[in-house]
Image (cartoon, rainbow, N blue to C red):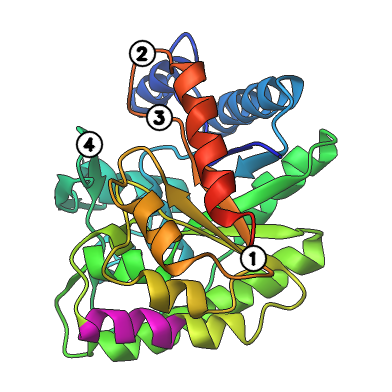
């Protein structure tokens, strides 16, 4: 049995990121100094996980503000009003996050909504009449940073279905149009990561725990059939969390994922689904047994019992 962590806190044990960003906004430090602080925080997290014996350590879980906003930048979903400011990429990013007022222009921040059943709020991407494309710079840089530290990470990205379901559309293009473009963009990302040396890539799809009807399941399947046809030798781990995927368990497990991560803490029906429908041969099951939202230490005896129950339910698969 191996261990995995899908993300590590990014703010720093002394809130270093918060203070560094405040200094950057006040023009007390340069962009390079902010990037240096971010790099140190990432290195601290990777080393701490490696020293703890974690087998699958995520990269690209770090963000200056929000991972949904990062995914919008990854896909080139930057509304025209922010591009017209002609700011640096970092300042354009922050303008989308909390607005901008200056000689270059005056814009409000993108809207925010609650992130599933947490107290966190995410930036809501806006999809205009643009073509989604892949700008993998951030993901590649962070993967290579960890690699230089001697740590092989799992690049982790919010998946295309969750991104599209949570984004708002203001133009005339259909959701299906964006879905096809997103699939192409993620295929390009996977290819670039494989060339850089990535072995595993995690695509996070928490939106699968929301209500799923036939149309939504069809859209998800359409996107991933295209992506999984071009894995370029990578192993793809589909990560779900914040609940169970009762509406689409059979359809998800039938797709050509190399691993599927299921939530056994907040997913009330997850164990029942595995018992009833089984888990496919040839796939790895990542069992989510620690609630990252819970401030209390886990009861390890109960977790051990849960692991044994999961093993019994999958031992003949």
Magenta span: 214-223
Q: Circle 1 — which element?
A: loop
What is the spatial separation of the Cα atoms under label 1 and label 2, in whole angstroms?
32 Å
Residue visible at 83% across and 39% down in the picture: 148
According to the picture, the residue beneath numbered tag 4 turns out to be: 118
**Of 179 and 252, which appears nearest the observer?**
252
According to the picture, the residue beneath numbered tag 3 turns out to be: 292
Q: Position of residue 206 (x, y in %)?
A: 34, 56
Q: Inspect the magenta stretch and tell me whether residue 35 lies in it.
A: no
Crowdedness of circle 1 by 10 Å Cα count: few (<14), some, many (20+)? some
What is the spatial separation of the Cα atoms under label 4 and label 2, in whole angstroms?
16 Å
What is the spatial separation of the Cα atoms under label 4 and label 3, in whole angstroms?
11 Å
> Is there CB contact under 8 Å for labels 3 and 2?
no
Q: Is residue 171 left or right of residue 191?
A: left
Labels 4 and 2: the sequence-earlier one? 4
Question: Given this view, does label 4 or label 2 mark the residue nearer the observer?
Answer: 2
Labels 4 and 3: the sequence-earlier one? 4
According to the picture, the residue beneath numbered tag 2 turns out to be: 296
On the question of residue 88 being in view, the answer is no
> Is there CB contact under 8 Å for labels 4 and 2?
no
According to the picture, the residue beneath numbered tag 1 turns out to be: 283
Question: Given this view, does label 4 or label 1 mark the residue nearer the observer?
Answer: 1
Q: Circle 2 — which element?
A: loop
Residue visible at 43% across and 18% down in the picture: 298
Q: Position of residue 84 (x, y in %)?
A: 29, 65
> Is there CB contact under 8 Å for labels 4 and 1?
no
Residue visible at 26% across and 52% down in the picture: 104
What is the spatial separation of the Cα atoms under label 3 and label 1, in whole angstroms?
24 Å
Q: Circle 3 — which element?
A: loop
């Amino acid at each position: 049995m191996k261990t995995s962590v899908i993300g590590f806190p990014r703010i720093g044990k002394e809130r270093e990121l918060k203070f560094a960003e405040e200094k950057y906004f006040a023009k007390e430090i340069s962009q390079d100094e902010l990037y240096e602080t971010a790099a140190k925080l990432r290195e601290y997290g990777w080393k701490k996980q490696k020293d703890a014996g974690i087998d699958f350590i995520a990269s690209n879980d770090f963000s200056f503000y929000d991972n949904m906003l990062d995914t919008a930048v990854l896909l080139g979903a930057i509304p025209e009003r922010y591009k017209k400011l002609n700011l640096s990429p970092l300042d354009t990013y922050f303008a989308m996050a909390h607005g901008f007022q200056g000689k270059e222009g005056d814009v409000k921040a993108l809207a925010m909504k609650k992130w599933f059943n947490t107290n966190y709020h995410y930036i809501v991407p806006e999809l205009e009449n643009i073509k989604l494309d892949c700008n993998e710079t951030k993901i590649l840089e962070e993967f290579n940073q960890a690699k230089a530290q001697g740590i092989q990470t799992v690049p982790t990205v919010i998946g295309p279905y969750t991104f599209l379901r949570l984004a708002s559309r203001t133009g005339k293009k259909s959701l299906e149009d964006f879905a096809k473009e997103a699939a192409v963009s993620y295929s390009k990302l996977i290819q670039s990561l494989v060339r850089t040396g990535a072995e595993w890539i995690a695509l996070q799809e928490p939106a699968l725990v929301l209500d799923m009807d036939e149309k939504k399941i069809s859209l998800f399947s359409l996107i991933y059939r295209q992506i999984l046809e071009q894995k370029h030798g990578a192993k793809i781990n589909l990560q779900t969390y914040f609940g169970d995927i009762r509406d689409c368990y059979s359809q998800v497990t039938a797709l050509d994922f190399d691993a599927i991560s299921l939530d056994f803490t907040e997913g009330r029906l997850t164990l029942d689904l595995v018992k009833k429908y089984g888990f496919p041969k040839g796939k790895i099951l990542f069992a989510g047994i620690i609630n990252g939202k819970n401030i209390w230490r886990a009861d390890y005896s109960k977790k051990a019992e849960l692991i044994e129950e999961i093993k019994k339910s999958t031992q003949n698969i």
